[in-house]
Image (spheres, rainbow, N blue to C red):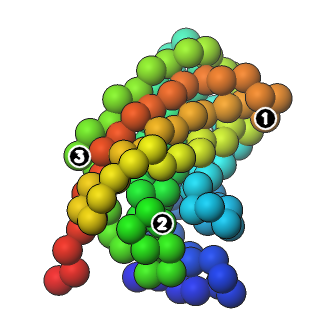
Amino acid sequence: MKQNDGDHPRVRRSGCQNAVGFEIDLSDPEGCARCHLTICEDHLNSQGILHGGIIAMLLDVACGNTASAWFDRQEHPMVLTLSLNTSYVAAIRKGRVTAVGRPSGGGRKLAHIHGELHSQDGVLIATAAGVFKRGSAR
């Protein structure tokens, strides 16, 4: 599932990632994953702002990859999202956004991760708090 790029794990691109066009950055030495998206018309809702579902997805990807690094930075195991509470703070219509996940605690099987989505000029767009479970190898 993963390819190793030097010291940074890399996960295989998903169909969702290909369809939406976001990029995952696992280069942070502390394991805080980032998810970047350049907004295009296909990402907007009927009001012309970034769709809330895409916002939640970006936060889920950043937080999930952060949880994976929490469990094992090199192996980058699969994780399952058990809960993701998202709060929408501001609207955005264009530009580039970045979601980042930060671990707030956990143990052998569960990780608690907080996430934030910011515009390229630093405006807070949304926050998230999630619980992620380490998946079992099959």
Q: Nearer the viewer, mark 1 or mark 2?
A: 2
Per the image, the residue denoted by label 2 is 69
> Which three-letter amino acid code belongs to the residue tagged 3?
Leu
Q: Count how many numbered circles sit on residues in the image.
A: 3
Q: Residues within 10 Å of mark 1 (few under 14, many from 20)?
A: some
Give how far apart the Cα atoms at labels 3 and 2 are.
Answer: 17 Å
Q: Quadrant of the C terminus?
A: bottom left
Q: Position of residue 40 (x, y in %)?
A: 67, 37
Q: Residue at x 57, y 62 (%)?
A: 31
Identify which amino acid the numbered label 1 is placed on. Gln
Quadrant of residue 113 in the image?
top left
Q: Residue at x 50, y 73 (%)?
A: 73
Q: Nearer the viewer, residue 116 or 57?
A: 116
Viewer-nearest of labels 3 and 2?
2
Q: In front of the other: label 1 or label 3?
A: 3
Q: Residues within 10 Å of mark 2 (few under 14, many from 20)?
A: many
Give residue 117's position: percent from left, percent from top: 60, 34
Q: Which residue is denoted by mark 3 in the rendering?
A: 82
Q: Is residue 59 left or right of residue 134?
A: right
Where is residue 136 shown, x and y percent of the image? Answer: 20, 74
Residue annotated with mark 1: 120
Under circle 2, the secondary element is helix
Question: Dots 1 and 2: beta carbons under 8 Å?
Answer: no
